[in-house]
Amino acid sequence: MSRWHALLIALVALSLLPGRSARAVAPPPALAERVAAAVTELDLEGARRLLEKAEADSPGLSFERARFALYLGDCDGASAVLSSPLLAGAPQAAALAELARACARATAGATLVERRAEGISIRLQDERDRALVPFVVDVAARARDAVRRDLGVELPRPLRIDLVRDLFSLSAVSGLPLTAAETTGTVAVARWGRVTMISPRATALGYPWEDTLAHEITHLALSRATRDAAPLWLQEGIAKREETRWRGPRPFDDEPNHDRVAREALRAGRSVGIDQLGQSIAMLPTPDAASTAFSEVASFIGYWIGENGDAALRMLFADLRGLGADGADQALRSVSGYDLAAWVRLWQKKLLKSSERPPERRLRSSREPKELLRRARLGDLTAARGHFAAALVELEPALTRASSEPALRWRAGRAALAGREAARASRLIGGLGDISAAHGGWFALHGRLRREAGDPAAAEASFAMARSLDPLSEDVACEGMLRARAGASAPDDPLPADRSRRDLCEAARALPRD
């Protein structure tokens, strides 16, 4: 029995205690349970019709009205319903009321952008994120199509997305404890029928927001497909699998290698455990534990699907929908012949059979990090004042010590471009084989150079990669086109021609970041 159904039964029992008003006959528990199921499956129109049929109220039905309002994003409405005397003294109703009030405070004055043609609704906590809307809509629509193709799940419209300023707002809107978000570096959550995601401008170098959005949309699809009965290992494993399936391959997609991470953790005794994830990976004690857990579930799901096929996965969803949250082992045995413990043993056995060892990693920094930081800072300060040659005097020696560090290559290449030394910039920026990690600014400048070299396809791929990482960085948003700095004689480079990209560039320039 789910926790919601248990609550409903308890609340309905309260309504039958002696001394209650006999003004109306309370609706049968079945109605509240049907509303709960419809809301959980994201069938909000179906839930609305059921609620409109109710001739009287009850604690269980009032609770579901509040939950329905939260799924719609009506935090004020949910708070009002939860203040009803019918729900007085119900602990879970009190907890939900606290969330509703926090959500109402965080979203006061928010802007709702409805993209009806695409079936996507975006609530912006900060109007300055409006320039991101076309890009968020594009990714969300493609990710929704991917889960329909891969999982056979049709998400209802509109698909709801909240874009918030910071972790405090993420916690307030979603209910995820702030300490958990801070500990594991959580930037997005799929709860209450929507994706709540921190704006990429909130972090110093952005984050892979596109794949993060696809990940969270997958969680919504799985909740719908299984009536929220998918165990956490299945939820997170499938979500990791779907992160990149909405798009084509990109650089660094194979990092980290999930099988390798899971195998190293198993051999070293650092395995989190497929069935030991707790309430949420976001609530694990350390970022390393969360990273290991993600790799373990991704590796396990890849193995399970490889052994059983996509058809078995869809059958598993259907069985979970019927059996509920406590029926995962029964569903697994029905579909594949083994329970979770047996499958975990088979997966671990295969992992340990591999003789593969971790590849030697290229060092991303020298033994003189303070010296590198000093040179990078001096380079930033001199370039900001238009002294690009002086900036390169600091930055080029740093590159000899940490040649694969993309942030250094970006700084040096940027200074050379600002000084109108395109050939020197191309040498300093280098190519994909010269960097050890993804960096939005590096890909933006690389895209500009590829376009100027007459390779528009490679340029577009680099710009797309840059936007997927740090879309409100000026270099990224303006596609490597530089603005004249104080003391520089060179004019601004032109803005992007595409309207959405030009708006993004102008928004980034209005949001200076350190």
Image (cartoon, rainbow, N blue to C red):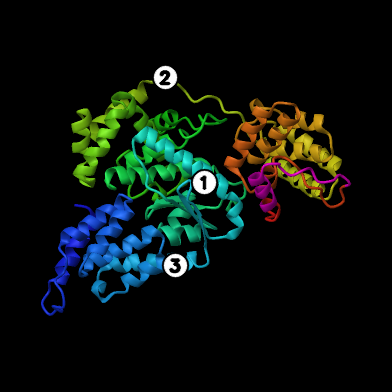
Q: Is residue 269 visible?
A: no
Q: Give the Cα distance between marks 1 and 2.
A: 44 Å
Q: Nearer the viewer, mark 3 or mark 2?
A: 3
Q: Does residue 322 appear anywhere in the picture? A: yes
Task: Name the kind of residue labelled 3 in the image.
Answer: Ala
Q: Check the image and report above or below for 333 versus 63.
A: above
Tell me the distance, in whole angstroms, between the alpha carbons under discs 3 and 2: 54 Å
Tag 3 secondary structure: helix
Mark 2 secondary-structure assignment: loop
**Farthest front residue in view:** 117
Q: Which residue was labeled with disc 1?
A: 137
Is 248 drawn above or below residue 170 in the view shown? above
Give the residues in magenta.
Answer: 489-507
Q: Residue at x 50, y 67 (%)?
A: 108
Position of residue 350 measured from the top left corner of the image (x, y, whole percent) = 33, 23
**Residue highlighted by disc 3:** 104
Q: Position of residue 368 (x, y in %)?
A: 69, 39
Residue mark closest to the camera, 1 vs 2: 1
Tell me the crowding category of disc 3: few under 14, some 14 to 19, or many 20 or more residues within 10 angstroms, Cα based: many
Mark toward the start of the polypeptide (1 vs 2): 1
The residue at 35%/32% (across/down) is 301
